[in-house]
Image (cartoon, coloured by chain):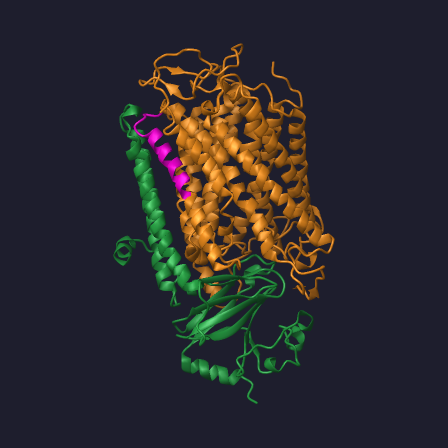
Amino acid sequence: MHSATALLVFLRWPLPADVAAHGHALDRHLLLNLNLALAFLALAHVLLFAGLMLRRRDASAQHKVMAEYVPLAGFALLFFLLAAHAQTLWANERFTGASPEALQIEVTGMQFAWYFRYPGQDAAFGETRPELVDAGEGNPLGIVPTDERGKDDFVSAQLVLPAGREVDLALRSLDVIHGFAIPEMRVKQNAVPGQTTHLHFTAEKPGEYALLCTQVCGLGHYRMSSTVRVLTPEAYAAWLSAREVHP
Amino acid sequence: MRALRLTHHRTVGFAYLGISLAAVAIGSFLSLIMRIHLAWPDRIFPGHGVLKPEEYLALVTMHGTIMLFFVMTVAPLSGFSNLILPAQIGATRMSYPRLNLFSCVLTAVAFLVACAAFFVPGGAPIGGWAAYPPLSASALAGPGQGLGMDLWLGSVALFSIASILSGVNTLTTITLRRCEGMSWNRLPLTVWAWLTASLLAALAFSVLLAALLMLLSDRHLGTAFFVPAGDLINGVIVSHKGSGSPLLWLHLFWFFGHPEVYIAILPGMGLTSMVLANFARRQIYGYRIMIATTLLIGLLGLTVWGHHMFVAGLNPFAGTVFSAASLAIALPSTAKVLSWIATSWRSRMQLTTAALFALGFVSLFIAGGLSGPILAQPILDEYLHNTFFVIAHFHMVMAMAATFGLFCAIYYWFPILFGTVLGEGLGKLHFWLTLLFSYSTFLPMHLTGIAGEPRHYAQLNGMPGPAAHLLATTMPLQRHISASAIGLAAVQLVFFVNVGLSLWRRRAISQNPWSATTLEWIPAGQALQCHQAPCQYSPDSTSFIPQWSTASENCPERE
């Protein structure tokens, strides 16, 4: 696949630089697809124009096998190869959960903000209830105050991640469907009220990246963005210990 | 002379086209306001002020609703099937004329109800044409989600009933009212397309109607088909009996939604085949394959809805299955493109405006269709989902290719509709300008999508942090796209001038000006009988055998 890709990446598509581990293979496959589409677009138009310009020829001289079945078989094979490779990438990313060592963070969407909950030192999230949600009282997620597991949970307005470590996000929504997307990390997954959806990936490069809402969720949809801050492992450890509740 | 009875299929057909004309004017106007706002977000609209985010989203929702239902379903399927289909199969009327009129009136009412949503408190709904719950399930979720949403649901429900009834009428007409000799393998491909699209309409709109009733019931009767327990909207826990799933709506909606896009495009495909063959003076390349692929696209179209839901929260294994089904549908589509290219290959086609629009349909269908297999791969959709890449994809196919199909129909059948021809000079100018601005508007959207621009964003500036930086990269292209969209709308003036001038001059024409072979061009007084397969022309293209001809000359037999 690689040599073919190298041959076909002749165009700079305006794809933002990728900073997630699984994104490199995704980008190569995407660029291959885009370049193939562009090549077929050009080829089809050359055939259309040539067909209109050239001298008329008897229609019966056309060979059905060459004009219809051979190209069709070719396209079937091509679609199969593309799909098979895409399937491998999809399976690698989605068919298994995160590794047990992955960092656990809960992401909650609500009109029109994202909240990121870290489980604290007990590595467990406290129970939440919608009737306890009260952002003004400092409990935007409705963490049950009597739940021991929740006592050391803390909520951040930015998604702060260590570079090079896998993260396992549990996506939730309090109200309507939101779309969790970090374009530069090539991840996108809807947060659906009433269910928890997991998404795992590894950020590679420290920096600040955009988190966008990609499912229309109301009038503030366009500004339901946040910042993903990827830190070096040392900086992340320092950030964490500053935020964590130490008994 | 032709009867002007209200139940006459031509009267109904013209009424459908009238609805579409009003709808396309409003729908295009809404899109231009959106485009101006996106490119110049601080612009003050005279008499209104700056566009608010909820107003932008209402424009998005209503643009999609009006264009998809009242233009792209009504004009190609209901409009032209009434105007042309009976004549093409040698029928004197539709099977159920009164039901036909009823469907048309219902469609008009549905359109008025949809438009009324703009004028109620809160305005039109803001959740997009797919109306995902819980956003669409509660008035608390935002402006427009109260009475505006109810009107929207009512409008689409009425439209669904009208479409089911009209689909049944068309199916019955094709099955039972074909004239003597019009066997299934002599049907023009337009009829096969209308047949398949009507079948899809009857099935898909039934499911949509059920889903709409369930959502209305969630909104007003406290049921919980789509709303999970403990849903907290705008600080209020919405109480419903039980716990439902928003994903159920996505399944039901897209089970309708995907066939719907084939309903919009199939008639254009059928017409393109017929028109290319007619002006190439050749048989349709692979006529039987074309019938098979039409039916196959319809059939597979019912199995691919999950490709709208790769990142919606389904089991990832489901993504694999829907990906395979969606890529499978690319094959019959490819077969169609190959047939169109082969039909025009070295044909020295007579490049009338109708033929040009058919070729334009092929060009735009290829350009839009090629991004289909990309979006059908879940791993790539994970990046591209709900970006402008998707907007570009479906506008190239469903908006522009289907529009070229409609223009092809208008230029080709104008003599049948109005007894004269449209001017070829202005027609060609109209074609080239429309083609140029179509590409100029929708091709760059692929690029802004690849750069990360999500759909449904009321503005691309004004948000804090890295998001602003990411989206700011698309601004130069935004202005180009908006300017092109304005150009695309403006050059349609050429078309209307052409229609006006042609109707005023009323050039005398022969009864069959395109030397067409299908029955809608039969001379008056000739017996309504079919003796031939369509599209039979002599090899030197000097003569042709129409379907009503009793001649048994040595014309090339089909396949």
Residue B157 spot, x, y in % from top left: 66, 42
- Magenta includes B256? no
Please give the range of residues in magenta: B330-349
Q: Quadrant of the N terminus of chain A?
A: bottom left
Q: Is residue B353 visible?
A: no
Quarter of the rendering containing residue B21: top right
Residue B257 spot, x, y in % from top left: 55, 45
The extreme bottom residue here reads A247
Q: Look at the picture and state if A211 lies above or below A86.
A: below
- Chain B shade in the render: orange
Q: Is residue B520 visible?
A: yes
Q: Give whichever of B55, B341 is nearer the camera.
A: B341
Q: Is residue B406 left or right of residue A36?
A: right
Q: Look at the picture and state if A158 lies above or below B164.
A: below
Q: Is residue A53 left or right of residue B536?
A: left
Q: Residue at x 59, y 37 (%)?
A: B202
Q: Main secondary structure of the magenta part?
A: helix
Residue B81 spot, x, y in % from top left: 55, 28
Q: How many marks on residues?
A: 0
Question: Which chain can be seen in green?
Answer: A
